[in-house]
Structures are given as C-alpha cells and as structure tokens.
Image (tube, helix red, strand yellow):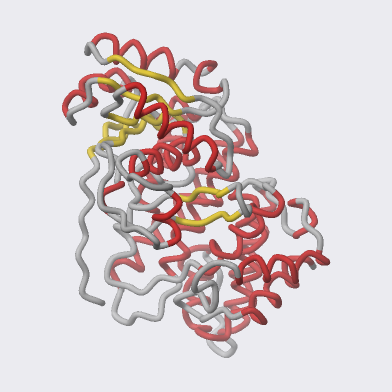
Amino acid sequence: MNAFTFYSPTLFAFGEGAEKRTGELVRQFGGHHALLVYGGGSVKRNGAYDAVTDALRDADITWAELGGVQPNPRSGLVYEGIDLCHRAGTDFILAIGGGSAIDTAKAIGFGAPYDGDFWDIFTGKAKLEQCMPVGVVLTIAAAGSEGSNSCVITQENGNMKWGSPKSDLIRPRFAVLNPRYTCTLPAYQTACGAVDMFSHICERYFSNTPDVALTDRLCEALLKTVLDAAPRALANPDDIAARSDLMWTSTLAHNNSVGVGRDQDWASHQIEHELSAFYDCAHGAGLAVVVPAWMEYVMRHDVARFARFAVNVFGAEMDYANPERTAREGIRRLRVFFAELGMPATLSEVGGNEKDIPAIIAHRREKPNGFPFGGFVKIGPDDMEAILRLCAK
C-alpha cells in the first residue's frame, strides 16, 4: 500500500426527510444568500425544489436561482452563474440534482472568486486556491460528485470536456441524500448511474499497487452491491432499500475512500470524455461501451487481477489451468450485466461512427499532456485507437 493523505470533510445527511435540514446546514456552513443550481423540471416534479426552498425559507436564507443545467454540463452556464454570484452577493452555492448540477456548482464556486476566466484553472494557467462553499441536495445516484474533490465541465469553445484539478477545496461542505428522490428517475438514467458508479470503482480496483487487500475487498463489496441493487431498482423503482444502496454506493465509489493507498487508472473515463464531447451521449452510456473494450485490450497486463474480478465480483469459477479463460469470463459477464441494464454496447449505439476515430484521437491530442494516460496501462494514440475499434465492433 502507498502512503496517503485522506481528507474528506463533507457532512452527509442521509435518509427520508433529510432535505428538511438543508436551510440549517447552509447556515451552519456560513451561508446567508444562496445560489440554487439545478437542471430541468425534474427537481420541481419530484418535490425536491419545494422541500429545499421551504427549508431555506424556514432558516431565513435568501436565494437566487440558476436552472437549465444539462447533462455533460457546459461552460456557458458556469459563466452565467459566476456573473449572477457577483451581482447577487451570493455567499453559498447549493446544487439540487445529480453530477451535472453539482459539477456546475463547483465550477461556479471556484470561478467566482477568481479574477480571470474560470477555464484558466482547468488548463493550468491559474491554480485553484479559493472556492465558495458548496452544498448538495442529491436526487440522482451516479457521479459521486457529492463527495468528490473534482468536477467535469465541457468548454463550449472547442468542445473540450475536461476534469478540473483535484482539490479538497471543492468538496461539498454537506450533502443531503434522500433516496426517495431517485425513485422517479427514468430507467435509463438509473442504469446510466449504476454504470457510472461501477466504473468509478473499477478505475481504482485495476491497480498495479501491491498489498492493497483491504481496499480490494472494499471495492469488491461495492461492485457486488451495484450488481445486486441496480436490477432491483429497475424492476421496482420504489424499492427504497435498493435505491438507498445505490445512493450510498455512488458516494463511496468516488469520495476516494476505496482508492487511498493505491495507484489508479482513469483511462476509460478519459476515453469516454471524448465520446460524450463528440456525441453528447450520457456519461454512463459511454462508459458501458468503453469499459469492457478497455478491459479486453489491457487484460493480459495482469490476468490474475481480471480473474479475481471475475471470481470475487461475478462469482465465476476459477480455471487454475487457464486463468485467462476466467479473466475473459468476467469481462463477458460484465457485458451481459450492462446489456441487462439496457445499456449500449457499441460506438454506433451512442451515436458514434468508426470513421470519427481519427478525429477523436486528434481532439484528445489538443489537451495538454493528452498522451499517454492511464495508471494501470499507459494508453498512447495507437492504444486509444485500438480500444475505440473494439468499441465499434
């Protein structure tokens, strides 16, 4: 196990009715005038918006609003939010929704105190040194941004979907998690969320670091929880036990509690960011295409780890005479699981085209230090092309 420093200061208020604490929590963390950041009409249809604004009103918190966050959140709304913060005297950012709303809130949070273009922090031109306090009322179990130290924004000038520098400054001060609000999600969104959290765990699980038995077991427990809970939530959207498991798994999958002390990969996410930049597909859908293809491509780097994945996560029988057969069986079972969730399996199913692969790779080259990437196996341009070709099959 590697040496590590782990600091995760987010307060989590979990359970039905937890949203009633939102106002007191904003005030607890120094807020008096909040900026509410949310997407379309779902938070109003499911009652989250009314519950949160009632709680703010009860705590004598005033607020301004910024709606219209889209999946794969865009820079334009971040600029709008920064301007609104300056004009309204905002001292707290409150996201209501899922990862896109939270990531937008985080970017506004560190963009508002910065004198220049917030995108300078993404490119490395400026350091992330300040962030307004951010809180979350979570309504989608997926991205884990409610507990993470990063965010992902698409810069519309150049269509660049990039992650911010990692910093504990942008971890939310609190996250309110009521799994009841996830019961009204469309099945496709629930499934995308399950793939997203599953992938976050895999990015940590596939590691070259030795002697990480504890976090290996924690990762496997979370992966098995997704395998169990996601089909139950799809079969019965009101299964609150399944929804609760998914909501807390999404948080643990990405607050890095299962990633400490081990090198991590993140190649699949880097490749998927290019797909969702090109095709505006749902992040989880893109990952469902990329992750099995990445596994197939890198599997021989550590056959034993992939065989362990097959046995300990999917319950495959170990073939000691031919461990590679077991490793491939785990990848096959992952593809089946994603298909049973209703997820796409090929590039064309997310709106892609094999003819675009050279342009996708060229777009990746535009990112500073774009190649190589990946901590488990270093991925260069030729490797990325090979993985995308596998995605096209």
Closer to us: 191 or 229: 191
Which residue is found at the position 74% from the left and 51% from the top?
350
Q: In the displayed structure, would residue 179 be above or below residue 311? A: above
The spot of residue 388 in percent (x, y) is 71, 69
Q: In the displayed structure, would residue 179 be above or below residue 302? A: above
The spot of residue 145 in percent (x, y) is 40, 45
Q: As drawn, is 20 to the left or to the right of 221? A: left
Q: As drawn, is 186 to the left or to the right of 132? A: right
Which residue is found at the position 50% from the left and 22% from the top?
43
Quadrant housing the C terminus: bottom right
The spot of residue 50 in percent (x, y) is 42, 12
Q: Tell me where residue 245 sits by quadrant.
A: top left
Which residue is found at the position 62% from the left and 31% from the top?
186
Which residue is found at the position 29% from the left and 46% from the top?
171
Q: Tell me where residue 188 sits by quadrant.
A: top right
Q: As drawn, is 1 to the left or to the right of 333? A: left
Closer to us: 278 or 96: 278
The spot of residue 277 in percent (x, y) is 64, 53
Q: In the displayed structure, would residue 146 be above or below residue 159? A: above
Quadrant housing the N terminus: bottom left
